[in-house]
Image (cartoon, rainbow, N blue to C red):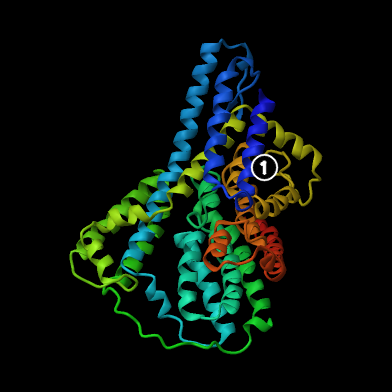
């Protein structure tokens, strides 16, 4: 039965990876894979000799000698435990996405466009790269990419030039998401899973992530694509909401408040996110009662908005397929973890891989090879980084703030930039700008690889400081 469960997982994983080739949204195989894996566990529960206890991070002793009713009860408890942990991440993401949509409802991101005064391509490249790096740490790399490419489309009219900027935005957004607990789904998973803390995450990864963004941007600024000035068209700006700036700063401040709330109260992050959403929603409701025009919407759409709560409208705009995808993939990985498959795989992996750059950690045990984590980063460019990090949570059992978890956060977060399909930011940019896979591979991938390796070397230095 274990072989059948692994086969289902691998098949589903393959379908997720080949999403663009088979024309089936990755949400579908993720949900099917999750349901079938747990169904096979339920049907074959009597025959499993081992069970992984997530609370103690070890195999449960004497599981094979338990009766079928006791095993079934154990499975139901484990399923509920994993659903609870997964729901913490999903509710957190729902809150963050809704706040971002409320900001957009008030056209708050148009305020960012006002910061860009220059016409020189290399300077605009640096402006967008730094904005992507900072914004992705606050509103997550996927949303930052959508916002900045939307602004880019208003500034750079030539698509052949614009896709170069988009490529560097992907690298910068993924780098910015790695050092913040709310910047990338995988980092959020490690933070909520009590593997990393905010202070140590920033301390370990801020410099490596900055270099991962800055080095490719510096190299690219000398390339022919970024020489000279932009041909900027003077387009008459439509009137924007008078509350756009207020809602931008309020929304971003509310999201940044979440880690502070967690440190003060020690409550799970989703509680703070719900508080932040509530506060932003109060102001959104108050401001929406004032009549104002929308930048991007015609009169008919404005009338439609006037009849609805901005919170209801924002909730209707969030990426629900992404939420369900995370549910499917995290619960499917939990199935493999519960059977002890990931635990055993991690043991064999550490035995066979060379322990390059390994230090003896407190307690006298050897850590996980740097090469394993670097390969995880390369792997995240080929397949989705969410299941990779979810698998690492079940495979490795180092304590909170161990350097391993920070290196995994960096590798999984930034390694995806090496292929355009390797990160959510890349996929959304690919859709918005119709960027060709092989164009990105030839023009941008080598820049992403250089940034990834420079940042990895920098991490090996910063981890010696803690």
Residue 383: where, in percent of width, then height?
65, 50
The quadrant in which the N terminus is found is: top right
Residue ID for mark 1:
362
Q: Residue visible at 40% across and 80% down?
A: 114
The relative height of residue 86 versus residue 39 in the rendered view (above or below) is below
Examine the image and state in which quarter residue 14 appears.
Answer: top right
Nearer-the-camera pick, 12 or 168: 12
Residue 141: where, in percent of width, then height?
51, 61
Residue 351: where, in percent of width, then height?
79, 37
Q: Residue visible at 30% across and 76% down?
A: 240
Element at label 1: loop
Residue 176 in view of the camera: no
Q: Residues within 10 Å of mark 1 (few under 14, many from 20)?
A: few
Residue 37 in view of the camera: yes
Q: Residue visible at 61% across and 74% down?
A: 164
The quadrant in which the C terminus is found is: bottom right
Nearer-the-camera pick, 204 or 61: 61
Q: Is residue 211 shown left or right of residue 309?
A: right
The relative height of residue 208 versus residue 112 in the rendered view (above or below) is above
Examine the image and state in which quarter residue 154 appears.
Answer: bottom left
């Amino acid at each position: 039965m274990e072989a059948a469960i692994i086969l289902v997982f691998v098949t589903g994983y393959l379908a997720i990876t080949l999403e663009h080739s088979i024309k089936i949204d990755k949400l579908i195989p993720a949900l099917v894979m999750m349901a079938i894996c747990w169904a096979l566990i339920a049907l074959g529960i009597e025959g499993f000799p081992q069970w992984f206890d997530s609370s103690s991070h070890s195999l449960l002793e004497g599981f094979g000698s338990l009766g079928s009713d006791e095993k079934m009860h154990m499975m139901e408890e484990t399923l509920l435990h994993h659903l609870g942990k997964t729901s913490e991440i999903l509710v957190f993401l729902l809150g963050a996405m809704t706040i971002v949509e409320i900001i957009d409802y008030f056209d708050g991101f148009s305020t960012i466009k006002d910061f860009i005064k220059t016409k020189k391509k290399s300077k605009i490249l640096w402006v967008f790269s730094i904005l992507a790096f900072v914004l992705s740490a606050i509103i997550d790399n996927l949303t930052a990419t959508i916002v900045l490419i939307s602004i880019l489309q208003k500034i750079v009219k030539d698509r052949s030039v614009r896709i170069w900027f988009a490529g560097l935005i992907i690298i910068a957004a993924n780098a910015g998401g790695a050092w913040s607990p709310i910047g990338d789904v995988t980092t959020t998973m490690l933070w909520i899973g009590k593997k990393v803390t905010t202070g140590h995450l920033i301390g370990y990864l801020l410099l490596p992530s900055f270099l991962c963004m800055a080095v490719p941007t510096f190299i690219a600024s000398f390339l022919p694509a970024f020489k000279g000035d932009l041909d900027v068209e003077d387009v008459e700006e439509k009137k924007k909401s008078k509350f756009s700036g207020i809602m931008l700063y309020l929304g971003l401040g509310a999201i940044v408040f979440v880690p502070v709330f967690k440190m003060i109260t020690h409550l799970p992050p989703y509680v703070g996110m719900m508080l932040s959403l509530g506060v932003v929603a109060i102001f959104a409701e108050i401001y929406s009662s004032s009549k104002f025009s929308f930048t991007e919407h015609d009169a008919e759409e404005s009338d439609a908005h006037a009849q609805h709560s901005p919170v209801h409208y924002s909730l209707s705009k969030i990426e629900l397929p992404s939420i369900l995808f995370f549910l499917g993939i995290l619960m499917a990985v939990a199935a493999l973890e519960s059977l002890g498959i990931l635990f055993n795989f991690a043991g064999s992996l550490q035995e066979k891989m060379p322990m390059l750059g390994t230090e003896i950690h407190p307690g006298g045990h050897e850590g996980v090879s740097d090469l394993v984590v670097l390969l995880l980063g390369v792997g995240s460019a080929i397949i989705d980084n969410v299941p990779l990090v979810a698998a690492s949570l079940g495979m490795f059992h180092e304590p909170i703030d161990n350097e391993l978890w920070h290196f995994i956060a960096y590798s999984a977060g930034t390694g995806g930039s090496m292929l355009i399909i390797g990160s959510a930011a890349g996929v959304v940019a690919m859709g918005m700008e119709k960027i060709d896979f092989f164009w990105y591979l030839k023009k941008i991938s080598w820049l992403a690889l250089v940034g990834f390796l420079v940042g990895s070397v920098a991490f090996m230095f910063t981890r010696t400081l803690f």
